[in-house]
Image (cartoon, coloured by chain):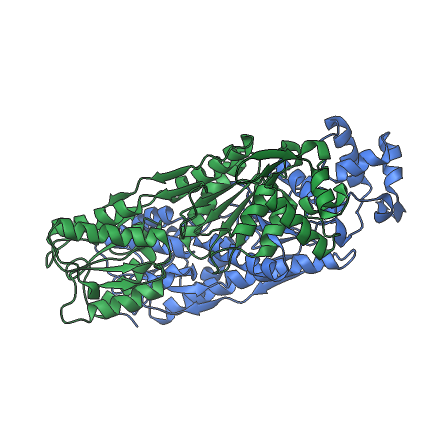
Chain colours: A blue, B green
């Protein structure tokens, strides 16, 4: 792993009107430091004074500096960043990225943004220092300075299942969440349900909003009223499915079916139903979302919307590697893989045994 | 990341009688190459002829060469290697290592030995090249040349839940598997069960053998016969729990209780019981092993032996970092964390409702 030489780099100076090219030496002159010092900053070396580092980073960003991509300067790594590392959901994603990494002779570096939706500044510095082939962010995003930092090092990134709106110029891989929410709810309507509740994920996550919007669209196109009291804001965790499930099921006018937002919340809802002595599907129909392995294993096996998580992760990893291979490629790529309804035994005609 | 200088290294020549010190220059002379070439091999650089590389590696191993540990030459990484990345089980382990890594400002590099029980040669080269603070191997091992390669770079390693017998000089973290199998089976005996089946994990895995031995010990100490027909060799997967569960439950003299070896096999057994119309626990008591999050969520919630997976992974990560901090430390450390029986609703008195 040799440090980048000046001739391996190129710079474009971006102003509102024009795009020019500047050298690393020019950045150094502007910053009042030597060219090797700018190199050290680019390589994430620790032996640079913090104030110098900040000044150089600002100039790199201001000038829209991009190190020329050179395979030789990259480590055989791909970074995978999670919002939170918590469920079998994350496992499917890890397996997908690992599959592609193995094919390409790369190793996967795993990080967690630990509940915050953008990973910390230290994280971006570490990534810049280890120079991976690319970064896959899951349900997570990057702030402006983090994006600038990765861009100046020509480290491509792709967001899988964007939490917020990542911006038009950020490549992303998602699933057809709206369509999935629609299919789940339409299935319940077709079985004859008229009072259908929903437990959503966090409202700040786009995937979660899209699912509930699909649920609403299915009710509205069937001419059924949307009752705001039957829509509960969850967080994709089992415990919340249980708690909000109890709230929904204890109502005197309880719903006969619930679209649970994801599989873990559906399992929480199973627990709530069990506690209240309600049978699934005779007394309550349940639809999940994700189709985690566990969905097949629970009793009764869960009807759910399959999201091809492993394939999505594979697609995100391939896309980020492709971006790294194309000099200067920045085509905004957004891909949504299809979801599909998997009918098992947790849904039935209201008041009757399973379909 | 600067390359190691010769003065940062030291060598001990091990013969059967004595321990001597040799320099990198002496290794180079023996190999008929320059000292920088030996450095390149140690640093995993690609620009060394394969035959030279092999010769140098052999000499490094022969002379028991150990690079002196120097924090400065390490990347802020910790390697985590799985036998297979497959279940919620792996997720708990990843979370444990990630917790420690975050505390220490390190990132986790994840690899999978993909079903083989020792990761490939390429893997060891990659690890040597990226110079992590240490390597945690899960249900996996290293062959002689891989151990030599890591040892010569002073990269410490710890095995979590050793699959085979890792050797006395390999530090490892496990759980009290035998004790867990004993507790699970004793619980069933105390409820009044007399015909108790078992589904084991793969017999090449020590943890799996120990659990079944605990099961046998419980039967024998209770004066009950051990019926070999009631012990089925599984592989820790759900599908196998289902398949072997059907075999056990279709017998005319079917067992009234089964120790399922792990939670995933227990869930497969649930499915087999459901298919045959047997109620849990009225017609069949089931005990799992692991206490994955899903054990609480299934219906009925699963009685299981809790294995503190996250704590075990944290302990393994801390141990490997400690080993890296102590110059020349090679104390064989074996730790087994305690398992504990968690009684939920899948076990009961034979023919009666849940306890």
Q: Position of residue B78 (x, y in %)?
A: 55, 42
Is B172 left or right of A118, judged from the image as shown? Answer: left
Query: Residue placed farthest to the front in the image?
Result: B17
Q: Position of residue A144 (x, y in %)?
A: 69, 42
Between B122 and B146, the one lying in front of the other is B146
Residue at 28% x, 70% y is A354
Q: Position of residue A96 (x, y in %)?
A: 54, 59
When asked about the image quadrant of residue B169, the answer is top left
Is A332 left or right of A342, judged from the image as shown? Answer: right
Q: Could you tell me if residue A277 is visible in this image? A: yes
Q: If the image is split into quadrants, where does the C terminus of chain A sit?
A: bottom left
Residue at 72% x, 35% y is B6
Residue at 43% x, 62% y is A291
Q: Position of residue A198 (x, y in %)?
A: 39, 56
Residue at 22% x, 49% y is B184
Count of numbered marks = 0
In the image, residue B238 sits, relative to residue A47, either above or below, namely below
Q: Could you tell me if residue B302 is visible in this image? A: no
Is A287 left or right of A77, judged from the image as shown? Answer: left
Between B325 and A296, the one lying in front of the other is B325
Between B325 and B90, the one lying in front of the other is B325
In the image, residue A13 sits, relative to residue B105, either above or below, namely below
When asked about the image quadrant of residue B209, the answer is bottom left
Between A210 and A113, the one lying in front of the other is A113
């Amino acid at each position: 792993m040799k440090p980048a030489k000046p001739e391996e780099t190129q710079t474009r100076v971006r102003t509102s009107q024009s795009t020019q090219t500047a050298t690393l030496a020019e950045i150094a002159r502007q910053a009042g430091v030597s060219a090797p010092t700018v190199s050290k900053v680019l390589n994430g070396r620790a032996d640079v004074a913090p104030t110098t580092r900040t000044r150089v980073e600002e100039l790199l960003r201001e000038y829209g500096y991009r190190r020329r991509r050179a395979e030789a300067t990259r480590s055989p790594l791909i970074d995978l960043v999670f919002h939170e590392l918590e469920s079998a959901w994350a496992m499917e994603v890890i397996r997908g990225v690992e599959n592609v990494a193995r094919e390409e002779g790369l190793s996967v570096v795993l990080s967690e943004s630990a509940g915050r939706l953008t990973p910390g500044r230290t994280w971006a510095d570490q990534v810049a220092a280890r120079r991976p082939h690319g970064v896959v962010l899951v349900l997570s995003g990057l702030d402006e300075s983090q994006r600038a930092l990765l861009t100046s090092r020509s480290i491509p990134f792709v967001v899988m299942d964007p939490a917020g709106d990542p911006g038009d110029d950020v490549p992303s891989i998602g699933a057809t969440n709206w369509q999935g929410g629609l299919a789940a709810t339409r299935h319940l309507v077709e079985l004859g349900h008229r009072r259908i509740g929903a437990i959503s994920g966090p409202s700040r996550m786009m995937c979660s909003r899209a699912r509930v919007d699909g649920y609403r669209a299915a009710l509205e196109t069937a001419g059924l009223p949307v009752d705001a009291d039957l829509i509960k804001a969850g967080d994709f965790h089992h415990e919340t499915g249980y708690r909000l499930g109890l709230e929904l099921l204890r109502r005197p006018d309880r719903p006969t079916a619930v679209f649970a937002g994801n599989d873990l919340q559906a399992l929480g809802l199973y627990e709530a139903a069990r506690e209240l002595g309600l049978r699934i599907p005779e007394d309550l129909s349940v639809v999940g979302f994700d189709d985690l392995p566990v969905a097949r294993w629970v009793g009764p096996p869960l009807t759910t919307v399959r999201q091809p998580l492993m394939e999505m992760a594979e697609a995100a990893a391939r896309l980020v590697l492709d971006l790294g291979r194309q000099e200067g490629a920045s085509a905004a790529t957004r891909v949504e893989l299809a979801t599909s309804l998997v009918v098992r035994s947790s849904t039935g005609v209201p008041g009757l045994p399973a379909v």
